[in-house]
Amino acid sequence: MQMLRILGITAIFLSGFLLSGCQTTYYNAMEKFGYEKRDLLLSQIADARGAQEDAKEQYADALEQFIAVTNFEGGELEKQYKKLKSQYEKCEARADDVHDEIKDVERVARDLFREWGKELKEYSTSDLRRSSERQLETTRTRYAQLIDTMKQAEDKIGPVQEAFQDRVLFLKHNLNAKAIASLKGNRAEIESDVTSLIAEMNKSIAEADDFIKSMDNKK
């Protein structure tokens, strides 16, 4: 994990290459630092894992604030509304982070597997080629399971985000005790959705940890 932290810091200085679409330049530059695509994939997975961890915590905070609003009795409703709106906007930012990080994982994985497949033809020793081929297939299978789990967790974000958006908009134009009471009536639904989202996030985070450990053990 220490290597991933160092690699992450190094990648920050070179991320402009990816943003500008110069992936080959980025990969070549990282290789000069001693990092191959395999290392970059692990780093991206760690980043995606971190983004999901942050999103999980943020949605839990947003739910807590929503519950606080529905339990609110008297006082400054405007202040409570602004707190909920702020939590909703933070959730939106975290959701974007998760989406972007997963896309980065997919891009690096695609490039890694393409390169790995091409390099199988370069072996002159058949036993080593077959061993590398088996390892490639094993890694592909594990990666497919990981990315599927990550996307399942991401898919849970949309409905929750929409639910928060609807309630924030409703309060914006109906900031009174009656509106608060009406939201309390369907609180269980959003609590269930957030709980399900957090469970999927935890599953994805654990899958990422397992993948990183399995790849580290092959060093």
Image (cartoon, rainbow, N blue to C red):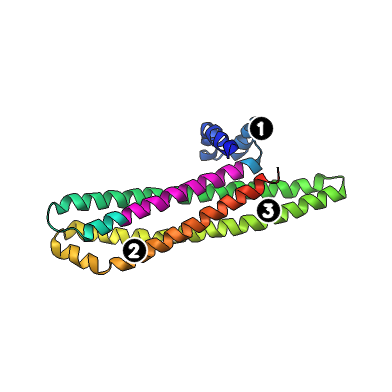
Give the mark nearer the N terminus: 2 vs 3: 3
Q: Residue at x 70, y 56 (%)?
A: 138
Mark 1 lies on residue: 34
- Tell me, yes or no, whether the two marked residues, 2 and 3, touch with CB atoms within 8 Å: no
Label ID, residue 139? 3
The span from disc 3 to disc 1 (Cα, nearest Å) is 21 Å
Q: Amino acid at mark 1?
A: Gly
Q: Is residue 38 above or below residue 146?
A: above
Q: Which residues are magenta?
A: 40-63
Asked whether 142 falls inside the magenta stretch, the response is no
The span from disc 1 to disc 2 (Cα, nearest Å) is 46 Å
- Tell me, yes or no, whether the two marked residues, 1 and 2, touch with CB atoms within 8 Å: no
Foreground: 110 or 91? 91
Q: Is residue 54 above or below residue 184?
A: above
Label ID, residue 159? none
- Tell me, yes or no, whether the two marked residues, 3 and 1, touch with CB atoms within 8 Å: no
